[in-house]
């Protein structure tokens, strides 16, 4: 077997193992551990980029490496590196738990890498469970035990329910198709997709992935989990976890959903409800992290618009959307972490006067929220435009109109946050926000990426199209 095609997974596993050994052999040293994690995650990005052209199978073809999976692994490794960049001053976690934090972070990333390379339904299920259980524990590591444990338990209960639903769906698919490898499913299921047992089994299987993506009605965990978890953990769930979920839902739908009008109708309904409920619920939020949670739910609806097209254009638009979510959401959470360095949950009112306290952070917040709303010339506008074009080519004009109305709704609550940062005067003089030179450089780089990728998206679109060609030749 050519183990080099699994170089990203092997390296990430060794990094997790290193922190596990460190937890047994050395006393906690936050600065050393953060620097080590930063260097390891940066090396992981390099390895993923170097192996982006890898192609082949491992483990009796249950593991598949191709351009599609390698692109998503590069995004996952980039997401891990970005999250670790904002973990230098974690005050909301006990020092004795820092080793465990990094072990779980690398192990969860490993599970997500295996998830996007899974070519077997059981391998996908096990990878999804491994990543989920890592996140359950990460949520509970917050120093404020009452809030963290409540959030973690809610996350766990919804997670095991969706896990049971997914496993039941996999059993139904196997009973109908007598196949568990996606390469076999793609040849068998399209011909029997109109059978109720197959369609229900496929929807139940997707249910476990909808949980990761916070699609209605599997979204109930998101606001409480974002609010109860450390901001760094919430950022990881909002970025890397969503990228992995997008990758696996694309592979499963591409393998099993071709030619099913019933599946398209169900996905259309879920997309409409997810984006509408997410945007309407976000309007009433005062906690910034809860607002971003409902925003994530709304973006899941936009993602489903590209998925249900079941075409190369639709898949390419979703891959590009995954990258945009990674950048936009991380930029927003960087502001959350910087504004509340003590680990507390900032409210919209706490952003008052941010443009004077930290012009750089105010700029990052404004550009990230405008990008999330889809305002040109940002990467968020380009990603939404690509998804809408794919839906138009499919003839889903009504869905595009509903999505555009939702974009206008989302612009309202994003503007409320920007107004607080630029126009609202604080009731009392808030503490100044101090950014390290590295975080300032990262902030400027994020603004540059969001704007430049909006002006010149062609290289990224071409890469997304090449990756989508693996799913839709």
Image (tube, grey):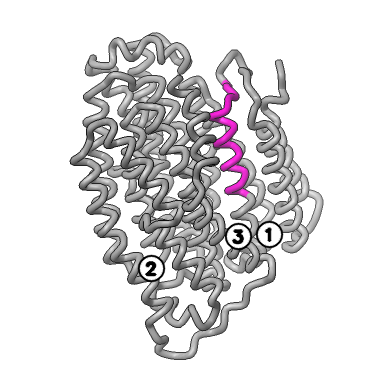
| Between marks 2 and 1 in the image, the one whose residue lies nearer the viewer | 2
Q: Which mark identifies residue 445?
A: 3
Asked if the residue at tag 3 contacts the one at tag 1, i.e. Cβ–Cβ closer than 8 Å, the answer is no
| Between marks 1 and 3 in the image, the one whose residue lies nearer the viewer | 3
The residue that disc 1 covers is 96
Which is more toward the observer, 80 or 231?
80
- Left or right position of 29 against 325: right
Between marks 2 and 1, how big is the CA–CA gap?
Answer: 29 Å
Between marks 1 and 3, how big is the CA–CA gap?
Answer: 33 Å
Q: Position of residue 100 (x, y in %)?
A: 65, 51
- CA neighbours of label 2 inside 10 A, class few (<14), some (14 to 19), many (20+): some
- CA neighbours of label 3 inside 10 A, class few (<14), some (14 to 19), many (20+): few
Q: Position of residue 79 (x, y in %)?
A: 58, 48
Q: Main secondary structure of the magenta part?
A: helix
Asked if the residue at tag 1 contacts the one at tag 2, i.e. Cβ–Cβ closer than 8 Å, the answer is no
Which is more toward the observer, 134 or 436?
436
Q: Which mark identifies residue 13?
A: none
Question: Which circle's residue, 2 or 3, is located before the other in the chain?
Answer: 2
**Which residue does the image show at 24% across and 58% down from the upper left?**
280
Q: Tell me the element at label 2.
A: loop
Which is more toward the observer, 289 or 472?
472
Question: Which residues lie in the magenta part?
Answer: 63-80
């Amino acid at each position: 077997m050519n183990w080099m095609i699994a170089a990203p997974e092997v390296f990430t596993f060794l990094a997790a193992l290193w922190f596990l050994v460190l937890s047994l052999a050395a006393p906690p040293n936050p600065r050393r551990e953060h620097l080590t994690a930063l260097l390891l995650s940066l090396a992981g990005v390099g390895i993923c980029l170097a192996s982006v052209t890898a192609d082949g199978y491992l483990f009796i073809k249950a593991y598949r490496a191709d351009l599609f999976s390698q692109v998503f692994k590069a995004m996952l490794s980039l997401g891990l590196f970005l999250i670790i960049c904002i973990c230098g001053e974690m005050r909301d976690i006990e020092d004795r738990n820092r080793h465990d934090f990094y072990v779980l972070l690398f192990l969860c990333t490993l599970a997500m890498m295996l998830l996007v390379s899974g070519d077997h339904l059981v391998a996908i299920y096990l990878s999804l469970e491994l990543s989920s259980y890592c996140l359950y524990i990460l949520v509970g590591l917050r120093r404020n035990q009452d809030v963290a444990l409540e959030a973690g338990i809610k996350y766990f209960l919804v997670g095991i329910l969706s896990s049971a639903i997914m496993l039941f769906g996999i059993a139904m698919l196997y009973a109908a198709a007598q196949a568990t490898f996606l390469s076999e499913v793609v040849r068998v299921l399209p011909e029997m997709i109109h059978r109720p047992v197959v369609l229900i089994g496929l929807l139940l299987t997707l249910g476990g992935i909808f949980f990761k993506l916070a699609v209605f009605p599997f979204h109930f965990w998101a606001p409480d989990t974002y609010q109860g978890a450390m901001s760094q953990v919430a950022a990881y769930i909002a970025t890397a976890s969503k990228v992995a979920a997008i990758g696996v839902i694309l592979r499963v739908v591409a393998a099993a959903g071709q030619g099913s009008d019933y599946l398209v109708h169900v996905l259309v309904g879920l997309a409409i409800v997810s984006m509408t409920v997410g945007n309407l619920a976000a309007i009433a939020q005062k906690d910034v992290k809860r607002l971003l949670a409902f925003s994530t739910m709304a973006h899941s609806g936009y993602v489903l618009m590209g998925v249900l097209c079941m075409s190369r254009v639709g898949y390419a638009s979703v891959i590009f959307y995954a990258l945009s979510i990674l950048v936009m959401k991380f930029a927003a959470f960087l502001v959350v972490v910087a504004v509340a360095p003590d680990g507390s949950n900032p409210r919209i009112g706490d952003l008052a006067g941010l443009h004077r306290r930290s012009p750089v952070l105010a700029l990052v917040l404004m550009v990230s929220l405008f990008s999330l709303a889809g305002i040109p010339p940002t990467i968020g506008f380009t990603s939404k435009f690509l998804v809408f074009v794919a839906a138009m080519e499919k003839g889903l004009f009504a869905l595009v109109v509903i999505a555009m109305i939702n974009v206008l709704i989302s612009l309202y609550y994003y503007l409320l946050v920007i107004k607080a940062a630029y126009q609202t005067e604080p009731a009392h003089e808030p503490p100044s926000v101090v950014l390290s030179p590295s975080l300032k450089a990262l902030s400027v780089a994020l603004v540059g990426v969001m704007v430049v990728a909006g002006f010149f998206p062609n290289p990224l679109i071409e890469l997304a199209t090449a990756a989508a060609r693996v799913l839709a030749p």
